[in-house]
Image: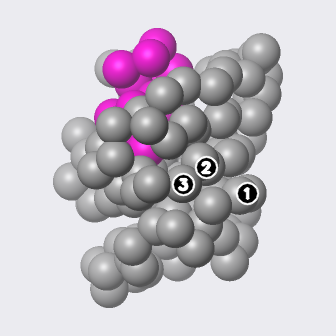
């Protein structure tokens, strides 16, 4: 089972985390299941960018982003070549190292 390693984020995951994830699970669902409250203002429908993450390791193991995700990513704060929306990126067979950006485009956190 692949492991998803979340780098420390001062508010969401101060200590960082390493979790085992079933292949086919989205990065967002994996985080939420393990108490990492990644923001997802559109309820994971690919209609915002609040769940934007940067895949520091394992990016090439993910399926390519669809056009609608690419269009949304253009609006994300701190966009990088390895950026993905965590509600759309599914874990494959390789470990991933994920950075949750410090900011989102939301002025206020939704706290689901």
Location of mark 3 (residue): 94
Determine whether label 3 and label 1 are within 8 Å by CB.
no
Location of mark 1 (residue): 56
Is residue 19 a member of the stretch shown in magenta? no
Q: Is 27 situated above or below 65?
A: above
- Is residue 60 in view from this perspective? yes
Q: Secondary structure at mark 1?
A: strand
Residue 18, image x, y percentages: 63, 25
Q: Residue at x 50, y 41 (%)?
A: 2
Residue 34, image x, y percentages: 44, 17
Q: Looking at the rendering, which quadrant does residue 40 occupy?
A: top left
Of labels 3 and 1, earlier in sequence is 1
Mark closer to the observer (1, 2): 2
Q: Looking at the rendering, which quadrant does residue 55 occupy?
A: bottom right
Q: Secondary structure at mark 3?
A: loop
Determine whether label 3 and label 2 are within 8 Å by CB.
yes
Mark 3 → mark 2, Cα distance in angstroms = 6 Å
Q: Is residue 85 left or right of residue 95?
A: left
Residue 51, image x, y percentages: 47, 46
Location of mark 2 (residue): 96
Residue 69, image x, y percentages: 36, 73
Q: Looking at the rendering, which quadrant does residue 63 occupy?
A: bottom left
Q: Which residues are magenta?
A: 26-39
Mark closer to the observer (3, 1): 3
Q: Is residue 64 left or right of residue 99?
A: left
């Amino acid at each position: 089972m692949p492991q998803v390693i979340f780098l420390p984020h001062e508010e969401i995951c101060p200590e960082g985390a390493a979790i085992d994830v079933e292949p086919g699970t989205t990065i967002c669902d994996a985080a939420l299941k393990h108490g990492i409250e990644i923001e997802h203002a559109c309820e994971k429908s690919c209609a915002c960018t609040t769940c934007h993450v940067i895949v520091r390791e394992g990016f090439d193991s993910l399926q390519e982003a669809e056009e609608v995700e690419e269009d949304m990513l253009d609006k994300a704060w701190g966009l990088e070549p390895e950026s993905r929306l965590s509600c759309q990126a599914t874990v494959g067979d390789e470990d991933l190292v994920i950075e949750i950006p410090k900011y989102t485009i939301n002025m206020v956190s939704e706290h689901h």
